[in-house]
Image (cartoon, grey):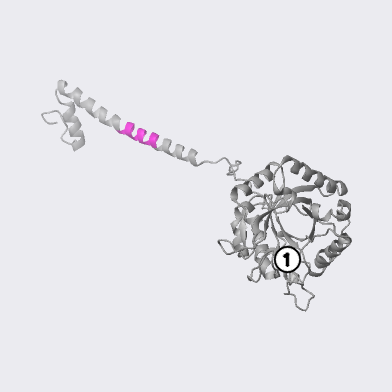
Amino acid sequence: MDSQGCDPRATPETKDTCSMNDSPPHTQAPKRRRLYRQIMIVPAVLALVMIVSITSYVMNADADKTPANSAPVPTPTASPSPPFNPDAGAALPQNRIVAFYAVPDAAVTGPAHELTEPMLARLKQQAAAYQQLDPAHPVLAGIDLVVSVPDRRPGPAGTYSHHVDAPTIDRYVEFCRKNNLVLFLDLNFGWSDPMTELNFFRPYLKLPFVHVAVDPEWMFPRHNGVPGVNLSNVRAADLNPLISAVAQMPAEYKVPRKMFMIHQYRPDGDDLANPFSPGAAIIADKRNLLNDSRVDVVIHVDSVGGWAGDIEVKTEQYTKWVAQGMQRFQNFRYGGFKIFYQLESKHKLMTPEQVMALQPAPMVITYGN
């Protein structure tokens, strides 16, 4: 052993230990404590690393774990809205319409020339008479209002017609809305472009209870006559764009199917050698009227009686212009009929029973003066 008490055969490691052990007593204790701390720190650090790793693994595993028997929670979806149906709420064929005709403030034209409670009561009473005769078809009361008025003078626009002022039309619209009435906007045109005229009143036609009536008697699309002076003659090509435009309105405005009423005062021209003669026919080619199921076209007989035998004549007109035309051309499904309280009562006013005896029974009946 050397002078420090260490075996000379000792390895370097045992020498270090020997040297430490042979150190003086007051220096050996601190060295042992430092070595002990170094030895103990290593496993503590390793244990801490393992704890952190295990905790992270468990947390990630729990986050990804889905119970074997759990189903995915469906995302709520809005129920699809039902497809638009123009049949819902349509006036025809479920109902019959009984309407009063008028130009505003012109008493000679019809009983609806002014909006009063007595007029409304009379209208409802007239409608009730038809309801009693045919309970299967509820009667809708209404007003056939001329809003495009024919004139014998060209006027500022050179159209031989003028519009009823907007405040007056608005009063009629509100009156009909308030009293659950059907409203026909009756277009008489003169020289006005038919589509321009229809489009002018289009804002009102967005309403579900507003429909269209046209009177070819006052319509001169070729500027070949003057309303009230000359007889008119129109062609299917003059009316078809209007029919098509009205047919598109239900889908466009999401309103029930509309009625398109064509007043007929004189015969068809389909069987005539010259169907374009105003003195012989009012509609040159009724066979060519557009057949569109999206609109309810009504051929409305509005010739005037007031003399002996007038009821038989008007009955024959309805048979030819409506019943036979409906069968021959199959481009319209409904007939209409007009009675004039004052003019026809000079002889004998046609009764509701006589009107309903027409075949097929008219679905639109109007009353003028």
Q: Is residue 47 magenta-colored? A: yes
Q: Residue at x 77, y 64 (%)?
A: 265
Left or right: 83 as drawn, with respect to 58: right
Q: Is residue 12 magenta-colored? A: no
Left or right: 206 as drawn, with respect to 116: left
Q: What stretch is highlighted in magenta?
A: 42-52
Q: Quadrant of residue 275?
A: bottom right
- Secondary structure beneath label 1: loop
Q: Quadrant of residue 314?
A: bottom right
**Number of residues whose C-alpha sits closer than 10 Å to that of mark 1, classed few (under 14), some (14–19) or many (20 or more):** some
Residue type marked 1: Asn
Q: Mark 1 points at which residue?
A: 291
The residue nearer to you, when weighing 1 against 342, is: 342
Residue 49 in sight from this viewpoint: yes
- Which x, y percent locates residue 14? 20, 34
The residue nearer to you, when weighing 93 against 355, is: 355
Q: Is 160 situated above or below 52?
A: below
Left or right: 310 as drawn, with respect to 210: right
Q: In which quarter of the image is residue 332?
A: bottom right
Q: Is 243 situated above or below 22?
A: below
- Which x, y percent locates residue 345? 84, 53
